[in-house]
């Protein structure tokens, strides 16, 4: 079993740093220790542990450490004493008298409250001597391999934990991890415990004998073991139990056990104890010394707390755990995935961080901090160097940027002295001067708005440096050092460090002389354009893409009678027509469709307007607005209407003239035919010298000539009356009627005529002579056609009828049949050719009345019922 266990592993087993003094004590090889107790307090209980082997033997150390730790954890004043039988190097039976004497001497007066024995030799030693050495002291055992109920026959106050080996599990494991293995060699020693292992192995391996051959290396001398190991076939896997000493009694340490296997075979080997894996073994389903010690400690504490040992069951069920050695797994190419679930793999190469996470973390943290510090220092140095280089580069870049700017730039120090400038700046002033603020008076400049000379301390840079003032785009007239007058915009601002202290200033200036000149020109052009725009009598608006007004001229402002600022942005139809949408007649919609100028006319009140919309397109032909022109065309429109009336009148006259020509030619022909006929008759009567007939012929010729003369006179009169009437003047129609009667007095008697005018008949505007002529014609006709009546009667009257004056001439004469009431107003129309007349009178009367804006018509009930001629004239 002894396998050298490194102090590192032992430290790990201790679990906590607090146990290190204890372990040091154990490692020093003390045969008896009374450590584990806090000596500052009197012990409540005493416990004695008798180990079978010696201090430094890994198995014994494992039990002792775990047991001690658990007891101390449960009761910190507990006193634990440890004794070793040293059974590997000395036979306990041989040294029994001395050992008994020693224990008696040591513990006679300080009897333990509980006695613990670890491993088989100690139990076998103590059982027969228990009553003598520790009468009445409860006994707890652990690490017992060869346990049987008979072992404890007759013993009282005893309990403990049995050490079970998972031999079957380990054989299964070997077969699974080494499917090519042909043999399993089982190695064990010569003592009773080893023979117990052999019996166990034989029994356990029986079910596997058809799968693999088993070789037993047991009860051999060292030489025999060495030879047997050398002869093991290469497909053998070794299952090893520690040989405490060979058949000849030569003790073999755990390290020597491993060395024998590794020196004489290259074969993989498995163990059943945790500590026997060593640094070469593969591992196995192993039992643990710590587990034994922990359970024994637990049972001990139960007894110390008053539980009877008989009531504490003997534990047979301590589980064995799969534990493996990483280097060996690597060496034999065993993959970790094929290990049983929950396996622990030890001795990984980089395990420090896992085994000592706290220390590793602290070390790592320290390293990181140290590295960080070094890195920060290096980085700081690098940064400073980079910053210096960057600064130089930035300065160069700044100089280049400043130089390339189209405006004059000057950077000055705290005193206002130039530290950087550019050529645009030199061009403005003619040269560059580095002067302190007090000397700024050398720069000649005047405020553009007031013309006042700028004092040295008034310059923007001076104000920026002294008062921290920022000035923007101040307009200044200057005289440069080469004598040129210019206008510049001048801005200045202070430059500050990160604490806000002024460390310098910057001035930006731009020569705007040319720009201002162009702006003046542009302004003049714009004014000229606006004046021209306003001079147009037509209302004009320029519309944007949405047909909202952008510009309007004066005529439009007057047209809509709005303030100019209330026009911009509105729609034309809102302002002109007061409607939410364009009028139906608006050319706007048509222009959108046709993309060319469209025109419409519309009438509002007494006025006529022509509206025109012309599209404005951009370079790509897209519609981007329109020009809208509204022209007052009332005068033109009225002229057109007058012209149209004139044309109608002319057409009417033409028709009348045609009719007239026809009638005239017809009516003139009648007397001419008569004359022509009687001239022939006259010639014949002269030839026959028929004197009586000659006179008759001449009478007919004469009357026809007279008739023709009358006809021509009346025609002439009609032609004259067709001319425009004279300037209108108020006419008293009653008076006109009386004058007409006076003129016709030759054919009228005073009794025949009766006047029926009111006292106050309003005058009508007109031509007095012409209106009298109307009465004259009507009165002469009335007299002519009622002369056969007894007595003949004529009524001449007038009255007001609304906005007109209505006059009439009524007679009791022959009357007029209904169908002719209108026809008689036609030229040369006569109902009875035998009656005197030419058929022109009524035509003339109608023409005169209509010329005065009135109307004339005739009424008659029928033949011999008299007639009435009415006419109305506007007042
Ligand atoms: P005239 O020279 O023939 O009278 P007018 O034009 O004055 O020509 O009249 C046309 C015709 O109208 C007359 O010839 C006559 O037949 C008819 N007429 C006019 N006045 C009267 C009247 N008062 N009574 C009856 N017939 C009339």
Image (cartoon, rainbow, N blue to C red):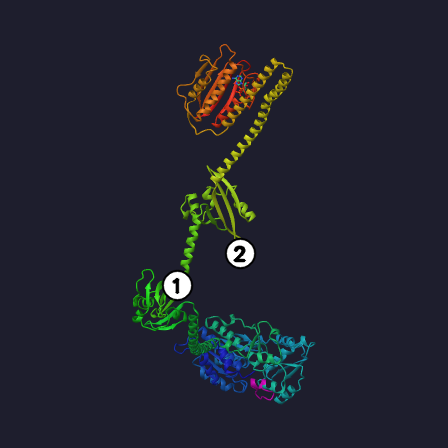
- Name the element at disc 2: loop
Residue 257 inside the magenta-drawn segment: yes
Main SS category, magenta section: loop
- Nearer the observer, 827 or 693: 693
- The reply to whether the residue tagged 1 has its Cβ within 8 angstroms of ligand 1 is no
* The quadrant where residue 755 appears: top left
- Nearer the observer, 384 or 583: 583
Residue reaching furthest top? 790
**Image position of 216 (left or right of 531):** right
Location of residue 516 in the rendering, given as x and y in whole percent from the top left corner:
40, 61
**Image position of 419 (left or right of 14):** left
- In the picture of the structure, the residue carrying the numbered disc 1 is 513
- In the picture of the structure, the residue carrying the numbered disc 2 is 619
* The quadrant where residue 184 appears: bottom right
- Nearer to us of marks 2 and 1 is 1
Determine the CA span between mark 2 and mark 1: 33 Å
Residue 608 vertical placement versus 432 (above, below): above
- The reply to whether the residue tagged 2 has its Cβ within 8 angstroms of ligand 1 is no
- Residue 521 in sight: yes
């Amino acid at each position: 079993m002894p396998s050298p266990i490194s102090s590192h592993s032992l430290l790990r087993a201790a679990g906590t740093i607090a146990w290190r003094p204890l372990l040091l004590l154990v490692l020093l090889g003390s045969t008896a220790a009374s450590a584990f107790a806090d000596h500052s307090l009197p012990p409540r209980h005493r416990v004695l542990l008798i180990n079978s082997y010696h201090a430094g033997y890994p198995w014994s150390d494992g039990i002792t450490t775990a047991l001690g730790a658990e007891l101390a954890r449960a009761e910190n004043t507990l006193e634990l004493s440890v004794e070793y039988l040293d059974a590997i190097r000395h036979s306990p039976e041989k040294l029994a008298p001395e050992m008994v004497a020693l224990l008696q001497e040591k513990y006679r007066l300080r009897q333990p409250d509980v006695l613990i024995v670890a491993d088989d030799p100690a139990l076998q030693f103590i059982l027969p001597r228990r009553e003598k050495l520790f009468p009445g002291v409860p006994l707890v055992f652990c690490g017992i391999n060869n346990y049987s109920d008979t072992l404890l026959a007759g013993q009282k106050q005893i309990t403990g934990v049995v050490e079970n080996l998972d031999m079957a599990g380990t054989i299964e494991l070997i077969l699974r991890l080494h499917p090519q293995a042909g043999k399993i060699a089982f190695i064990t020693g010569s003592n009773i415990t080893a023979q117990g292992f052999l019996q166990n192995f034989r029994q356990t391996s029986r079910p596997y004998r058809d799968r693999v051959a088993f070789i037993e290396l047991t009860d051999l001398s060292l030489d025999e073991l060495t030879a047997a190991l050398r002869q093991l076939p290469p497909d053998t896997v070794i299952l090893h139990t520690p040989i405490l000493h060979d058949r000849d009694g030569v003790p073999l340490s755990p390290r020597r056990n491993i060395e024998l296997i590794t020196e004489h075979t290259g074969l993989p080997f498995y163990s059943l104890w945790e500590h026997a894996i060593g640094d070469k073994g593969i591992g196995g389903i192993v039992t643990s010394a710590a587990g034994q010690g922990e359970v024994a400690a637990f049972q001990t504490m139960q007894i110390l707390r008053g539980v009877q040992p008989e009531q504490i069951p003997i534990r047979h069920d301590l589980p064995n755990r799969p534990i493996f050695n990483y280097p060996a797994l690597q060496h034999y190419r065993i993959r970790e995935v094929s290990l049983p679930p929950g396996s622990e793999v030890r001795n990984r190469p980089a395990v420090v961080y896992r085994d000592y996470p706290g220390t590793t973390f602290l070390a790592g943290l320290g390293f990181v901090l140290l590295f960080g510090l070094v890195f920060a220092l290096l980085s700081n140095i690098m940064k400073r160097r980079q910053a210096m280089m960057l600064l130089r580069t930035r300065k160069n870049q700044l100089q280049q940027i400043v130089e390339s700017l189209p405006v004059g730039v000057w950077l000055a120090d705290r005193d206002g002295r130039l530290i950087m400038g550019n050529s645009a700046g030199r061009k403005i002033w003619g040269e560059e001067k580095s002067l302190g603020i007090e000397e700024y008076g050398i720069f000649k400049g005047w405020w553009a708005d007031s013309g006042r000379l700028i004092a040295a301390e008034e310059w923007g840079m001076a104000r920026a440096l002294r008062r921290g003032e920022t000035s923007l785009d101040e307009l200044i007239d200057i005289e440069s050092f080469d004598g040129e007058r210019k206008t510049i915009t001048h801005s200045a601002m202070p430059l500050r460090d990160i604490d806000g202290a002024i460390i310098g200033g910057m001035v930006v200036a731009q020569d705007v002389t040319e720009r201002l000149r162009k702006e003046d020109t542009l302004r003049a052009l714009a004014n000229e354009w606006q004046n021209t725009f306003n001079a147009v009598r037509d209302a004009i608006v320029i519309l944007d893409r949405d047909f909202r007004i952008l510009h309007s001229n004066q005529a439009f402002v007057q047209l809509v009678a709005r303030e100019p600022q209330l026009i911009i942005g509105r729609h034309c139809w809102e302002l002109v027509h007061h409607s939410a949408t364009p009028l139906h007649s608006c050319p706007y919609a048509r222009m959108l469709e046709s993309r060319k100028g469209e025109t419409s006319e519309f009438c509002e009140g007494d006025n006529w307007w022509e509206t025109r919309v012309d599209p404005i397109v951009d370079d790509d032909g897209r519609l981007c607005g329109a020009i809208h022109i509204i022209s007052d065309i009332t005068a033109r429109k009225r002229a057109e209407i007058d012209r149209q009336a004139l044309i109608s009148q002319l057409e009417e006259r033409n028709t009348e003239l045609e009719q007239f020509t026809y009638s005239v030619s017809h009516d003139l022909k009648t007397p001419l035919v008569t004359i022509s006929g009687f001239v022939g008759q006259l010639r014949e009567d002269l030839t026959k010298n028929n004197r009586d007939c000659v006179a008759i012929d001449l009478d007919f010729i004469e009357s026809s000539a007279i008739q023709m003369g009358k006809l021509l006179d009346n025609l002439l009169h009609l032609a004259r009356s067709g001319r425009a009437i004279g300037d209108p003047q108020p006419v008293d129609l009653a008076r006109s009627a009386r004058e007409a009667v006076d003129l016709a007095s030759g054919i009228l008697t005073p009794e025949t005529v009766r006047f029926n005018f009111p006292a106050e008949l309003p005058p009508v505007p007109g031509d007095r002579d012409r209106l009298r002529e109307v009465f004259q014609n009507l009165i002469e006709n009335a007299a002519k056609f009622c002369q056969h009546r007894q007595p003949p009667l004529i009524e001449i009257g007038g009255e007001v009828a609304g906005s007109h004056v209505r006059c009439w001439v009524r007679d009791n004469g022959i009357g007029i049949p209904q169908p002719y009431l209108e026809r008689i107003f036609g030229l040369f129309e006569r109902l009875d050719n035998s009656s005197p007349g030419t058929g022109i009178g009524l035509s003339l009367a109608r023409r005169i009345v209509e010329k005065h804006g009135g109307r004339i018509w005739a009424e008659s009930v029928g033949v011999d019922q008299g007639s009435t001629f009415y006419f109305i004239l506007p007042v």
